[in-house]
Amino acid sequence: LSNHSSQRRSLKKKNVIMSALQNRCQTLAASILKEMTIFDTKRLEEKDDTKQEEEEDVRAHVLRACKVVEHESTKIGVLFSKQGEVLREEVSNSALDSFHVSLIAFTAYVNAALVNENYDIDCHRKQVKSLGEAVLRASASLIEAVGKRKENVRNLTASVWEQCKSAEKTMPRDGKDAVGKALMTHCRFIKDAKREIEEMLLTEGEEGFKKEDGEKVEDDFGEEIVREEIKVVDREVLGKAKVTIECTFAFLKALVVPLISNSKASNFSKSRKERATALNEIEKKCKEMRSAVDEIICEAMPPSDADVLASEAKKLKDAAEDMMKRVEEVLTGRDDTKDDDGMNHVDAAKKALAGVQSACDKM
């Protein structure tokens, strides 16, 4: 009877501890997710552009904070991954507190990165905010699993590691680097589009050809079309689209590489606001080009609409011309001194732009 009573007391104590842990983790997970709202805080004051003050390397702080979060999440994974094992309350609370503190520090440094001199670079803000939210979401999921004593604690711990490693890898050095990353993403999309339309134009006997002439296939809307019709009726349209996309990729390649590598891209303007405006506009126009390319590929497939193709080609052409103007301002420095290297890049890009203009006109 004494042993039975002792077991009941032990079971009751275990249930109390488990219930307390579940409540604690539920509250903590909600708190972690709530901390993301700080990333939407607007800057209250503008910095004085005339002062060249040395700023803390907030990026380095974010990277160090990532490593601490990763380390503390490992403790959580080790302590709570064993099913059926109940930790002493002080042990579990200590581990959870340490993990939470590491996330508070991480959140603070990410927010500092958002409100530093790169605040006005839209894609810098998006990239930093995105990596910050990804780490916090993964951490909240881990804590929820701990509270509910789920079996995937170890996997969710690995997810926190993965997001921390990703943050360390993708955290932009500055606004210019953020713009460069965004531009490269757009360029990769257009390169993939180029490869996609090349595959559409393959003929029988060529490497990569998969469908036989006359075979019925489905388009993006589930409608049956015959491959022979694509080859005979729309091959000219697809060919024009292919040339347009090839010229677009060549143009962006001529612009993006020198823009990312040119040191003047970070200090060409007289003010931070002017620099941010130029870089934001460059990324915006590149995104518009990417969108137009996507629409051109979709519309080039039967049944195609010539008016829609012409409209998207004009959007592509206008965006390329606007982007050229902005990048020229950056690469030439907008000052009284001549930058021969920048001018060489501009001349090459203008030749590539002529190709885009000609191809779009023929669409």
Image (cartoon, rainbow, N blue to C red):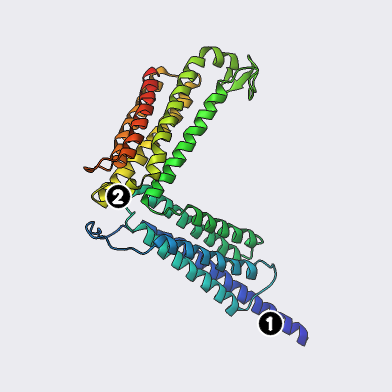
Relative height, residue 176 to residue 198 (above, below): below
Q: Which mark is residue 267?
A: 2
Q: In this figure, which residue is indicated by the disc labeled 1?
A: 9
| Near-viewer residue (89 or 249) | 249
Whether residue 219 is visible to the viewer of this picture, yes or no, is no
Residue 94 falls in image quadrant: bottom right
x, y (%) of residue 78? Answer: 64, 68
Q: Residue at x 42, y 33 (%)?
A: 291
Q: Residue at x 29, y 35 (%)?
A: 325
x, y (%) of residue 18? Answer: 62, 72
| Near-viewer residue (115 or 325) | 325
Q: Residue at x 23, y 43 (%)?
A: 335
Q: CA distance from mark 2 to mark 1?
A: 70 Å
Local secondary structure at mark 2? loop
| Callout 2–callout 1 Cβ contact below 8 Å | no
Q: Is residue 106 left or right of residue 228?
A: left
Relative height, residue 293 to residue 282 (above, below): above
Whether residue 124 is visible to the viewer of this picture, yes or no, is yes
Q: Amino acid at mark 1?
A: Arg
Residue 143 falls in image quadrant: bottom right
Q: Earlier in the sequence, mark 2 or mark 1?
A: 1
x, y (%) of residue 89? Answer: 59, 78
* Total number of numbered discs in the rendering: 2
